[in-house]
Image (cartoon, rainbow, N blue to C red):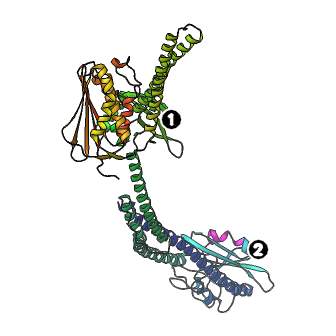
């Protein structure tokens, strides 16, 4: 787990960088030190070789090679030069080897000078005891003899067969006073001293590298923990934001990039919190708007599954609230709109479908839902209950048909009468008078029809105002009953007025109340058989509610027709042949609504009908 943390990665990276850097610097340093050591050694050996060359030149130029003090000098060359020294003649033959005067060994030797010596020890005599050609030149030295004898100085590094290790060989020519090369001097030394120094340097470098590595690990870990601390704080803040805590802050106060990132994250939390609050507010507003819409709304996902509905849908679909998604899916399946929804999302076009549902006419307006890139993310259905609109449209058509029918009959009678008189078909004065009376009757019927239509239109438009005056109910009923007395006597109908208590005077519109009572009494007398009774009963409910009941013993109205008697031009079957426009009850209903009242009806076929009108009483002028 720790290996996945950024602190571990930073520490490893830091240590690797330090290790690579120190290794690079160490290698460069060792190479430079080695080069310097070798170059310094070579310069020293060249200087020593030149000095030996000058001394050797004097020796080789002297007669018989004799030179006072040269032997002691040669015996100390190994120590002075820290090298093996060979001196050759001009032909490359070995002439002198350093250290021979102190050579230890068993046997005899000959030398230049007087005397002889034999046995273990140093050769004795009065002169120098240098051996010629006692040891051959190493092969690596022989390779450069010709180059040195040509007058050039030579420096080479190679493996020595004498020392069995790497060596440095330096050669310089020996030049006499006449500037003639009379020999050469070679210094041959192992690099053991230099390599030992280099090895010690490498060891010191390794120890330093190990110490630096330990220090780098500690400092890298410490630095990484400090570096990742604000990142952890930012991570905690981000997690709090994902949990909905938009008040969380990082607390990072730095001037570098991490501080800028922390400030940006704090600003993001602030802006995100504000944005989420605004979204919740907008969501609440949208929810309120959807709830207030009277049409039903259904949102679908791309799999045609409903994901959201508003409260109005349950009422439209005649379902209890809340409307469960499972029940909605079953109802939509019965309505068979899945095919239309699929087509709407495929074509990206809205569509309308009319469906019948539980005696209602429902209009489904289906529309696709697209995102900013034009991709379909679902669909929405607007459900409208157009049953009332369909019914009103049907009433409008029936109204036009009824008006046309009501006008056509009297107009046909009038036209026929006029054509008969114009053509001379009717010539007798009695017939002409009868035709005139028929046209007058039909004209009066047309006048009543037009008057009723105008009255209904004014009531529906709300242009009629109520003119209140102080009224006395018994006087109003006497007036109305007197106007129907003649019609009642012709059919043998007895009108009875009943009141169980006195009705106090009240304020109301006399003409509208009289018109209302006339409509109901006219229907009661018109649709009652001869020799029956019509009763009018009034009573009070409380102090401000007047009830008026008008009962007849007529043909009655079927139960399935009671809801339609208030429609314009509606007539029950038994009244089709009677005179009337079919607008009376429609006008009465509007008059009752105009005065803030209510009306109920009870009827039974062949037994009669009872209308009850309840009107609020205004006992004082307002």
Asked if the stretch drawn in magenta spans residue 394, the answer is no
Between discs 2 and 1, the one toward the N terminus: 2
Q: Which residues are magenta?
A: 127-145
Residue 503 appears at what percent x and percent y? 24, 43
Q: Which mark is residue 405?
A: none
Most foreground residue, 407 or 109: 407
Residue 318 appears at what percent x and percent y? 31, 34
**Which residue in the rendered view is the most extreme toward the left?**
500
Answer with the quarter of the image where residue 216 lies: bottom left
Residue 228 appears at what percent x and percent y? 41, 68
Disc 2 designates what residue?
150
Which residue shows up at 37% across the image and 60% down it? 239
How many numbered circles does the render carry? 2
Most foreground residue, 416 or 492: 492
Q: Is residue 319 above or below residue 45?
A: above
**Which residue in the rendered view is the most extreme toward the right?**
178
Q: Which mark is residue 350?
A: 1
- Which mark lies nearer to you, 2 or 1? 1
Q: Residues within 10 Å of mark 1 (few under 14, many from 20)?
A: some
């Amino acid at each position: 787990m720790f290996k996945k943390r950024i602190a571990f990665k930073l520490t490893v990276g830091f240590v690797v960088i330090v290790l690579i850097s120190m290794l690079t610097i160490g290698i460069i340093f060792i190479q430079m030190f080695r080069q310097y050591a070798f170059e310094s050694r070579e310069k020293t050996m060249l200087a020593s070789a030149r000095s030996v060359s000058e001394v050797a030149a004097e020796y080789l130029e002297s007669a018989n090679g004799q030179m006072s003090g040269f032997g002691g000098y040669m015996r100390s060359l190994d120590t002075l030069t820290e090298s093996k020294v060979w001196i050759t003649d001009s032909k490359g033959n070995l002439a002198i080897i350093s250290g021979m005067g102190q050579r230890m060994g068993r046997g005899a030797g000959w030398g230049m000078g007087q005397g002889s010596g034999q046995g273990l020890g140093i050769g004795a005599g009065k002169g120098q005891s240098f051996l010629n050609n006692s040891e051959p030149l190493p092969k690596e030295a022989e390779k450069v003899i010709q180059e040195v004898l040509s007058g050039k100085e030579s420096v080479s590094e190679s493996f020595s067969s004498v020392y069995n290790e790497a060596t440095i060989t330096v050669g310089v020519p020996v030049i006499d006073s006449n500037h003639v090369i009379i020999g050469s001097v070679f210094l041959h030394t192992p690099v053991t001293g230099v390599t030992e120094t280099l090895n010690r340097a490498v060891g010191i470098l390794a120890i330093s590298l190990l110490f630096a590595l330990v220090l780098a690990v500690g400092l890298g870990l410490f630095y990484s923990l400090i570096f990742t601390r604000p990142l952890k704080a930012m991570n905690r803040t981000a997690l709090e934001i994902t949990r909905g805590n938009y008040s969380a802050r990082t607390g990072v106060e730095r001037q570098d990039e991490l501080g800028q990132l922390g400030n940006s994250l704090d600003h993001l939390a602030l802006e995100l919190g504000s944005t989420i609050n605004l979204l919740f507010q907008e969501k609440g507003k949208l929810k309120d708007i959807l709830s207030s819409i009277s049409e039903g709304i259904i949102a679908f996902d791309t799999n045609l599954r409903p994901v959201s509905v508003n409260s109005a849908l349950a009422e439209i679909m005649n379902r209890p609230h809340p409307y469960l998604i499972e029940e909605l899916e079953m109802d939509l399946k019965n309505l068979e709109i899945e095919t239309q929804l699929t087509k709407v999302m495929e074509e990206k076009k809205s569509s309308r479908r009319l469906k019948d549902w539980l005696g209602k006419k429902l209009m489904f307006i289906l529309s696709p839902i697209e995102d900013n890139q034009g991709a379909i993310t679902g669909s929405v259905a607007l459900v409208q209950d157009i049953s009332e609109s369909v019914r009103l449209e049907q009433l409008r058509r029936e109204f036009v048909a009824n008006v046309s029918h009501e006008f056509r009959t009297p107009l046909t009678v009038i036209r026929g009468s006029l054509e008969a008189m114009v053509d001379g078909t009717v010539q007798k004065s009695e017939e002409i008078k009868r035709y005139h009376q028929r046209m007058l009757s039909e004209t009066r019927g047309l006048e009543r029809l037009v008057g009723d239509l105008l009255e209904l239109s004014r009531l529906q438009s709300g242009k009629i105002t109520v003119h209140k005056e102080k009224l006395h109910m018994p006087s109003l009923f006497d007036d109305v009953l007197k106007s129907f007395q003649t019609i009642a006597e012709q059919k043998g109908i007895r009108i009875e007025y009943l009141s169980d208590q006195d009705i106090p005077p009240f304020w109301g519109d006399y003409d509208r109340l009289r018109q209302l009572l006339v409509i109901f009494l006219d229907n009661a007398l018109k649709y009652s058989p001869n020799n029956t009774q019509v009763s009018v009963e009034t009573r009070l409910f409380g102090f401000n509610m007047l009830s008026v009941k008008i009962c007849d013993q007529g043909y009655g109205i079927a139960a399935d027709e009671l809801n339609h008697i208030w429609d314009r031009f509606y007539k029950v079957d038994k009244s089709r042949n009677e005179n009337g426009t079919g607008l009376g009850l429609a006008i009465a209903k509007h008059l009752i609504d105009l005065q803030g009242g209510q009306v109920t009806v009870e009827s039974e076929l062949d037994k009669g009908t009872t209308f009850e009108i309840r009107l609020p009483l205004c006992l004082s002028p307002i």
